[in-house]
Amino acid sequence: MHRAGAGGGHGDFHGVFPYLVSPIDDNGHVKEAVLVRLVNDLIEAGVHGLTPLGSTGEFAYLNAAQRRRIVEVVVHAARGRVPVVAGVASTTIAEAVEQARSWDELGVDGILAILEAYFPLTEDGVVRYFNAVAAATARPVVLYTNPQFQRSDLSLRAIEKLAATPNIRYLKDASSDTGRLLSILGVVGDRIRVFSASAHIPACVMLIGGVGWMAGPACLVPRQSVELYELCRKGDWNAAMALQRRLWQMNRAFAQYNLAACIKGGLEMQGYDVGPPLAPQMPLSDAGRAEVRAILSELSAGPTVQTARRRTPGPPDAARTSSAGIEAPADRSTSTPRRRAIRRGTSRSAVRRG
Amino acid sequence: MHRAGAGGGHGDFHGVFPYLVSPIDDNGHVKEAVLVRLVNDLIEAGVHGLTPLGSTGEFAYLNAAQRRRIVEVVVHAARGRVPVVAGVASTTIAEAVEQARSWDELGVDGILAILEAYFPLTEDGVVRYFNAVAAATARPVVLYTNPQFQRSDLSLRAIEKLAATPNIRYLKDASSDTGRLLSILGVVGDRIRVFSASAHIPACVMLIGGVGWMAGPACLVPRQSVELYELCRKGDWNAAMALQRRLWQMNRAFAQYNLAACIKGGLEMQGYDVGPPLAPQMPLSDAGRAEVRAILSELSAGPTVQTARRRTPGPPDAARTSSAGIEAPADRSTSTPRRRAIRRGTSRSAVRRG
Amino acid sequence: MHRAGAGGGHGDFHGVFPYLVSPIDDNGHVKEAVLVRLVNDLIEAGVHGLTPLGSTGEFAYLNAAQRRRIVEVVVHAARGRVPVVAGVASTTIAEAVEQARSWDELGVDGILAILEAYFPLTEDGVVRYFNAVAAATARPVVLYTNPQFQRSDLSLRAIEKLAATPNIRYLKDASSDTGRLLSILGVVGDRIRVFSASAHIPACVMLIGGVGWMAGPACLVPRQSVELYELCRKGDWNAAMALQRRLWQMNRAFAQYNLAACIKGGLEMQGYDVGPPLAPQMPLSDAGRAEVRAILSELSAGPTVQTARRRTPGPPDAARTSSAGIEAPADRSTSTPRRRAIRRGTSRSAVRRG
Amino acid sequence: MHRAGAGGGHGDFHGVFPYLVSPIDDNGHVKEAVLVRLVNDLIEAGVHGLTPLGSTGEFAYLNAAQRRRIVEVVVHAARGRVPVVAGVASTTIAEAVEQARSWDELGVDGILAILEAYFPLTEDGVVRYFNAVAAATARPVVLYTNPQFQRSDLSLRAIEKLAATPNIRYLKDASSDTGRLLSILGVVGDRIRVFSASAHIPACVMLIGGVGWMAGPACLVPRQSVELYELCRKGDWNAAMALQRRLWQMNRAFAQYNLAACIKGGLEMQGYDVGPPLAPQMPLSDAGRAEVRAILSELSAGPTVQTARRRTPGPPDAARTSSAGIEAPADRSTSTPRRRAIRRGTSRSAVRRG
């Protein structure tokens, strides 16, 4: 199915943009097959765009070659069906500009601009950085700010200055302060559109005027995420909150663990062999695995599955066993490739494609 | 107008609870007349309850005698029309228990329990404190947590433990992390009801299942606050957000200044002689005054005034010139008591009572 | 032994000023006898001054009556032998001024001025506060700053302004940043003298030009603290560091626990019935007790005891078995007031006076 | 002059190790000539070792090629006269191991191991990282910890575990908490030697048992730094503190600015064309320049110059005009290569070489 304009004519970004994980093998190579499969499945689940090299994508743990290959694989796999907005992240303008130009040449639809810092920066330095990235591409730029992880935050005044740059058109805020988003919209809402991150409640961000969310958990529950987005868009807030409450269990649990470990661990449960986060990050602990498994299991049952019947059958290489499906733990240890293929096929027609 | 059950039968708290300022004169005495007038006006504006000795009430700056007198005056002035939920705040259990008992005897309808700390506390110590306060009163207790100001926060696990205490029935969260509220509701939502603070967007907290807000800004814009609450309750989210966006200007501005200085400064502009915050806190700066004045002026105009026609005329000593009304700066310096009385009378019939 | 001018002619403060604990019984009354005994023992151990109502003295947990009584008892017990520098601590100028005047009337030799804050203060507000305290007393004032616990810190610029006030003559810094002290001395070293806190290494503060330390651990090891001070004053840095290394074990251990719980717990082991910290603070945990006990035991043995040869043997149940001596736990439970009285008398002549 | 064992037989590191700046031109190439000259001048000034790719060396702002070239140039320029301890810094074990192996092959004498992190790490992850770096080289490893800049700190327990690894033999602490160093020495002092950073007072770290310091300011005042080190080693603490007080002005000033901007700006004043810090970092502000200039000027005068007479004349291409010498600002704008050569020659024989 081709989703013309799924992400908004590929220049009008909106909706659910999963932060893609970065599957890397022991030799440091991108595990391309599983990344392609994840891209296909997410698009078929209805996501509106894809964001490689976000925080969940472990951008801070990848070298230059790995980053480039991730972008190449994702752009190629997406085949224009949804926009790809790839992360650019550096401490220096020189390196960020080089990344932006490279991603541009590889065919991305937009740039997620992330500022890293070691020494604190002045506001002028922050503005210079983002404007340099924007000048390096003709694509729309999404400003990214995460006060928790970087040493420099985007002040409201810096955002106001940056909003004057024509292709700086979006902001993705990874704080947990939703009021900050309303303040930003109050000042630059006519020029900048706002995406939520997983630390905000997506339904709240939609209520106050956001256009969607870019977040890791959507990798695990793409269909429900899209359903939530659609309920918000329709203004069916009661139904939206009913679904939001169920999905929030995941955000609540993930806040206790390394985010990349959670998403990668959950994807492994769903049959995606994406591997652990890059060392010395540790794989999800046993307690974390149990918690993620329980949540995915609970989310795969229940009322949100009903919409699945509208879907058409998908290709046989699909993996998910259910909406937020997981394989039973017992099955995993004994499963063979053959059994997995069967189970996957079943699950797709039965649940995801119904 | 008597508002039977305005705050919920005085045991089912909900709606808008302004954090009352604490007007203290140069000799350290409570300025009772202006406090009584503020209480009357807020009740007539429709607020659902009153909260003396919250953070905006400068509890941390008042001595024992001042705190006691504030509670006495407010309870007496409220005359049972709306519930009074008074702040109890201490570093020690002994002192907190004494306050809770005293407020109880003075006739409050509930206790807002605030934990102060100098040395960090264990979770057990935190739970002990709040349970001791709850045991000292038969009234409903509102847990208060403000990670920004105190050194000990209420963990989700501590809240879960406290929810087992029958009269711990509410929580007022002063963080800016709305997702935290949804997590709390996910765990103890069947036992604990949640109030927002001014750092959250009230409409968002209502959307996710909150029952109202306790906040300083409602002192300045009580009628619009009540209107916002009613729109949220009706599920008219479009209208709610239209009003919320206008009101949020105030929260955005206040985040830059000392909160008590802002509310007291704004009330002075509205004709309430509440004085400055207690020294060494500084009065609102000139820049702050200009910003608060502009916002109050903007809020007092426009579409939200339309609902005023439902109201009945009030007593002649009312003070507000308009919904969020302010006196023109030029007028203030030259105004005489007589001119003020005239202006007040006019404003009341024309705007607030219209 | 009378120590005329031990603390410097009572206006030239220097040396070891133990932060006194505040022993409070279950009814909220000051346990006067044990406080008097502690004061006497510390003076006889050679300390140069006494500081009631510091952080270890739980000033933040005491009500007005308790604070006043502590100061009265300490001033009376000290009988002018060493200077008493009492803590004044408040969020408001009005209350701080009242405390300073009261302590003055009670006969203190100096004021330790502590600023508490709830809302952040401007630098002007900070300067106003300390200058108001200084204006309320003719005694020397010690500025206290503890960035860890209060919300407002004394900037270098604020200190420079305050140094112009004649009776602001000392600073006690409770950060762990010794370089900050050298910076302060570089700017106001001709007007302000600097005391260390327990987060600094006293020997280092002495090396860079400090005049002593005000700290809780000196309650437990007064004699060794004085010995360390004297070694530093003589410039015998090798011996000073040998002793400092041994004493630092205590600071290292205490950093893990509530400081008041550690000092009170250690004093209990030494036979001072000072009770636990005020609830909801928890008494020292079992692990903490074991660690404090082991350190006190180790400190009471070994080379620093060499000065003990001046001593005469004491009875086997002596309260302080040595310089930093502890009683065996079993002894404590069986001791009677009578036995304790005997032991105290004995221990004083036998061990501490030896 | 050959300094056999200057840094301790190149395996027994001690003394002053300047953190070298990384001069990069507009095309991203290492400015090799100025780096070689700086290395030569520092060695001739008596420093005991060199540390490329520390924080002052902007390791966090350099790409893989730049890092490698910096190490190559420094090792080649040092010609074995003093040990070169080069920084390895990454978020991943894979990348850190590759750097350690490469620096090893390039001939460094030791590795400064820096952990970067985006998501918080468990203690196990931290230990794994440092042990992996140590396993990748036979050279001594210096653990680096900077709680201010990275998201994961080395706990005392992690350090204890790492001390069991034979070639982990040093620790360089960039906190400002000198007591932490004494705690570390108390636990692993028999296995791990400690270097100070510029946030500590070097004389204090020497007093408590440190073996030297690794810091950026030593680039600007190498001779005085070495003099301070020698005074500390001799136990001449009075003279050491007299010099330390003068040098501390620099640390005090630098704390206000970007450290790389300060050191690079100061070196430019001394005639080293190292350029500004990498964008978007800003060059030193005018106020910062004036302050650095005044301090260098003050340090270049006075008693510390006296030891210069021991030195022999150096080559004509030397740059420094005096011990901490700076060129007069007026001169800089008008100076020609010829005038510079003259001035440099003069300064060397007159002051640095005496």
Image (cartoon, coloured by chain):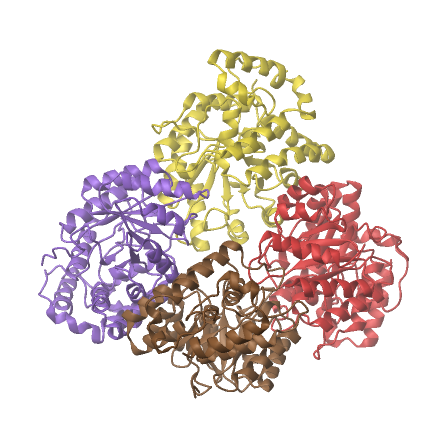
Chain colours: A yellow, B red, C brown, D purple
Tell me if C283 is positioned left or right of B329 in this view: left
Which of C291/C143 is in front? C291
Is residue A127 visible to us here?
Answer: yes
Q: Quadrant of residue B51?
A: bottom right
Nearer the observer, D93 or B330: D93
Q: Quadrant of the C terminus of chain A?
A: top right
Q: Quadrant of residue C350?
A: bottom left
Q: Is residue B237 above or below residue D13?
A: above
Residue at position x 81%, y 72% in the image: B33
Instruction: Please state the horizontal and vertical placement of residue A166, each as a whole percent of the image.
Output: 51, 42
Q: Position of C194 compared to B310: left or right?
A: left
Question: Where does the image place residue C71, in percent across and percent down from the top left?
Answer: 58, 79
Q: Quadrant of the N terminus of chain A?
A: top right
Residue B22 horizontal side relative to residue B78, left or right: left
Asked whether, in this view, residue B338 is left or right of residue C67, the answer is right
Q: As displayed, is residue D62 above or below residue C231?
A: above
Residue B347 visible at all: no
Q: Where is residue C49 drawn, in percent x and y?
A: 47, 80
The picture quadrant where one finds residue B60 is bottom right
Residue at 73 percent across and 72 percent down: it is B66
Looking at the image, which is closer to me, A181 or A299?
A299
Q: How many marks?
A: 0
User: Horizontal and vertical percent for residue B344?
Assistant: 83, 67
